[in-house]
Amino acid sequence: MDRDCTGNCILLKRLGRGGQGEIYLAWDEEKSSYTAVKRFESQLLEGIREARILESLCHPGIPEYLGRRSEDGHLDLFMEYIPGISVKEYIRIHEKIPERRTAVWGIQLLDILDYLHRRSPPVIHCDIKPSNLIITKRGRLFLIDYGTAILGKDGNQKLGTCGYAAPEQMDGLGYADEQSDIYSFGMTLYHMATGHHPGKKPWEDDKNYGFSRGFSKVLNKCLQKDKKDRYLTVSEVRRGLKRALRKRAAIRTGAAVFLILAAGTCWKTGDGQEQSAYAELLSKAEEERSKAGSRFSMKAVRYYELAIDRGPGQAPAYERLLKYYQSAGREKEGLTVLAEYVESKDFDAVGKEALLYRMGLLYLQGKEGKEGFPPDPILAYRYLAMQEHPSDIEKDYTELAGILSGKSYQADRLWEILDRCGKKTEDFRQTYLLFQICRQKEQELKKFGDVEKKQEELADLMEKLSENSDERRTALREKAAYYERMIDSCGLEAWIEAADRYTDMLEQEKEKAEMQLKKARLFAGYGRKKSAEEVYRAVIRQYSGWPEGYIAYGFYLAEAGKRDMAQNMYRRAKGLGAGGDTELHKLGAVLGEENN
């Protein structure tokens, strides 16, 4: 049945590309709800074919088809909008997905494929991959994009995505059937569980990926190049994956029983009151943490996880586990572990607001350094919005994440939230987050308040709230950068004071030398030539084996017309082995030394 969609939908933003069309988020004014729109500017017949397939489907893991509309030479398909995150994006953030979570989502995907393949004629998706899987905040999986789907054995051209598509899909005939989807399913699970894109790091059946035996067996059979060696139906795959999941759970339960028996499931206190196994496991976790000292203890982690398994409806074990990862500087790993619990549809811990708030803030703030990760306002909003009874400040940060994720953007509202949060925060990382937002959105916020003054206040507050050398160094670095941007209004001296304090906090001599060179250049740029020369000379005295100091001073001398002195700097830098340095070649060209 053809359905004409005549509602007044306003396109809000482009979400991506699917098949032969562009995908947009739209607002349906009549229904006051979001909808997804796939627009075909050309290849309209393919759009109609996709609409025919979609309108015949009805499954909880497939977005509902709402209708179509043709106008101005293009075709729009309207579908249910699924708010969530693609598995591709989930992998980008978490690097990989734990085996158990991969298997759980894999079983959900197999349920969808089983429905498609059992239809008459069967629907072959032909493009199963992480970017076509959406996970909702309740952990429910949807399979999207039916632009390359075929009915029965219609395939007679190359279909699918390289790396995920079965060999028979990519040969000259482009033939695909149910077993082709099984191959793509296997490659998708491989990518999920390892973080390796199959087009870049292909599956090797003899390689140890650290999977359980049952999980490896399922993947290996799905990924056979010859179809006769693969599973015949998705029902067989599902049975194999469920069996692997049960065996893994049995092993895990056995280990849990051993640890619980070793710990003792309960004990008597001095007044004869019996303590629960839950409290005992938490106590054991804290004991293992203490024993390990500065070393990260996986045994402590295991006790926390056992406590969670013992009391999934109690929040303390979740919170302490995340705090432990955070205290070890392994926030990203901790968030990945906690996300597996939170994404479970059974997650409903009493007092979970604090955990969700902490997770949301960590994603909103991100982290610098080797074990760091970039801010992700989309995931931050995902977890902050799960709070059922947020406080006023928690509501502010939820709205802030929503604004930054693009859900809605009103600069005046953003300014109100930044101003209010800035007055209430007593945490370094929250203050740093607010400072970064003020800096990034400076031009948009200027009309609503003194955003430059706000940055200065937040920089001072960051320094005040810093609790260790890393935080203090970050605060002074941002303060120096702020005053450098504001030299014209605040004057050079304010920057010099901040830069000197920051330089004193630096540990590497090269970084200190580079800050001194920056100071010399700024002195020169503002006409303070005597001060500039003093700093340049101090640098080459203190760092006499560092060619960059001589090169920088050489440029300054050449510009000042002191050619002989500049040539001396050039030769000294060259004598220190800087012959391959691009800046040295530039200085040589300025001085006419390159051919000598």
Image (spheres, rainbow, N blue to C red):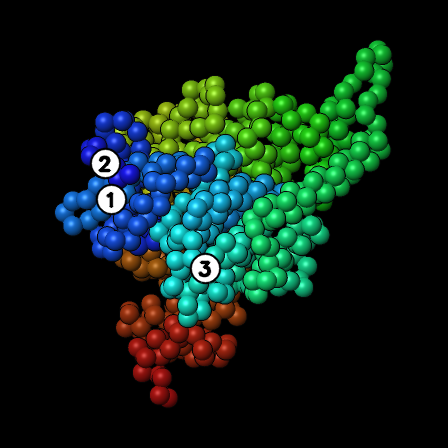
Which one is nearer the viewer's eye here, 404 or 45?
Answer: 45
| N-term mark: 3 or 1 | 1
**Pointer 1 residue:** 76
Residue at image position (45%, 49%) is: 122
Mark 2 vs mark 1, CA separation in Å: 9 Å
Q: Give the amino acid at mark 1.
A: Asp
Question: In the rendered image, which quarter contains the N terminus?
Answer: top left
| N-term mark: 2 or 1 | 2
| Residue 438 at x, y percent in the picture | 34, 37
Labelled pair 2, 1 in contact (Cβ < 8 Å): yes
Q: Residues within 10 Å of mark 1 (few under 14, many from 20)?
A: many
Q: Give the amino acid at mark 2.
A: Cys
- Residue at the top extreme, as displayed: 271
| N-term mark: 2 or 3 | 2
* Horizontal relation, residue 116 to residue 317: left or right: left
**Pointer 3 residue:** 176
Mark 2 vs mark 3, CA separation in Å: 32 Å
**Pointer 2 residue:** 5
